[in-house]
Image: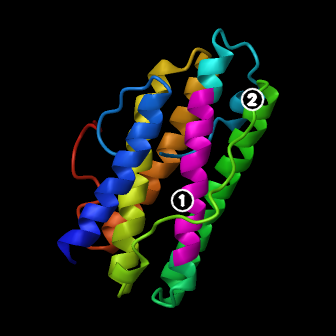
Amino acid sequence: MSFSFIRHGEELLSSRRGMLQATGLTLSGTAIAMLAGRESLAASNKTKSPHKDVGILNTALGAELEAIAAYQVGAESGLLQKPVLDLAVQFQGHHKEHATLLASVVSKLGGKPVVAKAKYDFPVDKLKSQADVLRFAAMLEKGAVSAYLGAVPVFGDRELAKAAASILGDEAMHWAILSNALGDNPVPMAFMS
């Protein structure tokens, strides 16, 4: 894998951190994750700082939309073998569910949900093999984990924080599965930072 491919992935993660920092977050690590407590997220309306929470939710929504687009690039690349393609489509489906829910909550809190970009700057010219696609997806999932990790403690509404932590779990599972598929250690550390 070339250094420029890795550097491009780091730039994507850096831009996610910048988006989150613009909403008042300080992130540790890389970027987003799972949704098990979605009922509490969808039902939540008692936030003390809805404007700040809407900003955090919209940042997460933007990252989910980016992940959906990235998995689409991978699926359409022709580089993924059948079982891996099925898994990528499943993970994309998770991101679609996250995005639908996040957009709904942003609207419920009186905000305007962000929409997907017309075009994302993915390193498609660097995706030459199934391993390249998996490494790119793993990098995005790791970034998602980090972003949710940074977001959870700053939500004004604790129910939103719990739901975001649930999404974090999903993203962490995606990252671990992709890492394992690449032959990397799927759980390289005891704590996320």
Instruction: Locate residue 69: give its quadrant.
Output: bottom right
Q: Secondary structure at mark 1?
A: helix
Name the amino acid, label 2: Gly
Circle number at residue 67: 1
Instruction: Locate residue 21: give its quadrant.
Output: top left
Location of residue 11 with respect to 86 vertically, above or below: above
Distance between the alpha carbons at the discs numbered 2 and 1: 22 Å
Number of numbered markers:
2
Q: Which residues are magenta?
A: 55-73
Instruction: Find disc 2 in the rendering and name its residue.
Output: 111
Residue 31 visible to the viewer: no
Location of residue 2 with respect to 163 vertically, above or below: below
Q: Is residue 87 magenta?
A: no
Q: Residue at x 54, y 59 (%)?
A: 67
Q: Are marks 2 and 1 in contact (CB under 8 Å)?
A: no
Circle number at residue 51: none
The percent coordinates of residue 152 (x first, y second) are 48, 27
Q: Secondary structure at mark 2?
A: loop
Q: Residue at x 65, y 8 (%)?
A: 48
Asked whether 165 or 119 is in front, the reply is 119
The percent coordinates of residue 142 (x first, y second) are 37, 52
Asked whether 126 or 72 is in front, the reply is 126
Q: Residues within 10 Å of mark 2 (few under 14, many from 20)?
A: some
The percent coordinates of residue 81 (x first, y second) are 48, 89
Residue 152 visible to the viewer: yes
Name the amino acid, label 1: Ala
Give the mark, 2 or 1, whose residue is nearer the N terminus: 1
Quarter of the image with the C terminus is top left
In screen coordinates, is 166 left or right of 4? right
Q: Residue at x 35, y 32 (%)?
A: 27
